Image (cartoon, rainbow, N blue to C red):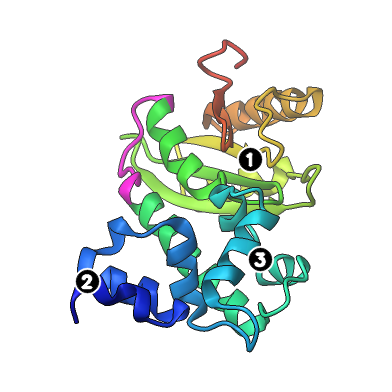
Amino acid sequence: MAQNTIKQWAVDDRPREKMILKGSGALSNTELLAILMNNGTANTSAVELAKSLLYAVNNNLTRLAGMSVEEILQLKIKGIGPAKAVTIVAALELGIRTHSFQHKKDSVITSKDAAEYLKAQLQHKTIEMFVAIYLNRANKIIRHEVISTGGITGTVADPRIILRKAIECNASSLILSHNHPSGNLKPSTADKELTQKIKQGALLIDIVLLDHIIVSHEGYFSFADEGLL
């Protein structure tokens, strides 16, 4: 089929045919989402549904990537039901995992090494998550553990759980991290107090707290780099 016949295709078919002819890089975000939706409704094309979805998230793909199936359904976009929402979330999760894998580190030498890996995993999350990375004497990652998840405003991390898991995997050091869905990277008073509590507890069992890294779509904040450890 020649390219000059594109205008004759049904609207729902154009993104798919365009990808075949020109490759995925030639498609807009709207067109890629339309392909995921596969079809529209009797009165709305898949392209129009995709536009409505992007409009609902202010054209912010990072925000969309962090949404759950339920959160997409709560947008109340007529024509986007559970099946389409599941497909969208699954596709964007694959993208997140690909990005995370590309930044995966076998060993951590600098705060940037850890921050890139953690940011790839946590920056899209719409709820706060607290994780710990456990390392051996060679600074190789031996365990990555989600300690807790919370609401939009925060989460609670129990120092006893964090340190118990460090002992279980025979860690020599650890790195703490949590995300700020708001984008603000400034540590709270509670963040600072928790960090010091875990640092002191870790020292009692000969484990070193290397860093506490806050991540968001805006970047990252390292307690170690800022002299807060």
Q: What's the CA distance linking mark 2 and mark 1?
A: 46 Å
Residue 147 drawn at (x, y percent): 65, 51
Residue located beneath label 1 in the image = 179
Badge 3 or badge 2: first in the primary sequence: 2
Residue 5 drawn at (x, y percent): 27, 76
Badge 1 or badge 3: first in the primary sequence: 3
Residue beneath the point at 58% across and 79% down: 84
Residue beneath the point at 79% across and 51% down: 151
Question: Does the segment drawn in magenta span residue 104?
Answer: yes
Residue 62 drawn at (x, y percent): 55, 48
In the rendered image, the quadrant that contains the N terminus is bottom left
Q: Residues within 10 Å of mark 2 (few under 14, many from 20)?
A: few
The image quarter containing residue 205 is top right
Q: In the drawing, what numbered circle is on residue 3?
A: 2
Q: Residues within 10 Å of mark 1 (few under 14, many from 20)?
A: many
Q: Which callout, 1 or 3, points to the residue nearer the camera?
A: 3
Q: Nearer the viewer, residue 68 or 43?
A: 43
In the rendered image, the quadrant that contains the C terminus is top right
Lateral position of residue 229 relative to residue 17, left or right: right
Residue beneath the point at 30% across and 57% down: 26
Span colored in magenta: 102-111
CB-based contact (under 8 Å), mark 3 and mark 2: no
Q: Secondary structure at mark 2?
A: helix
Lateral position of residue 220 relative to residue 16, left or right: right
Q: Residues within 10 Å of mark 3 (few under 14, many from 20)?
A: some
Q: Secondary structure at mark 1?
A: strand
Residue located beneath label 3 in the image = 68
Badge 3 amino acid: Ser
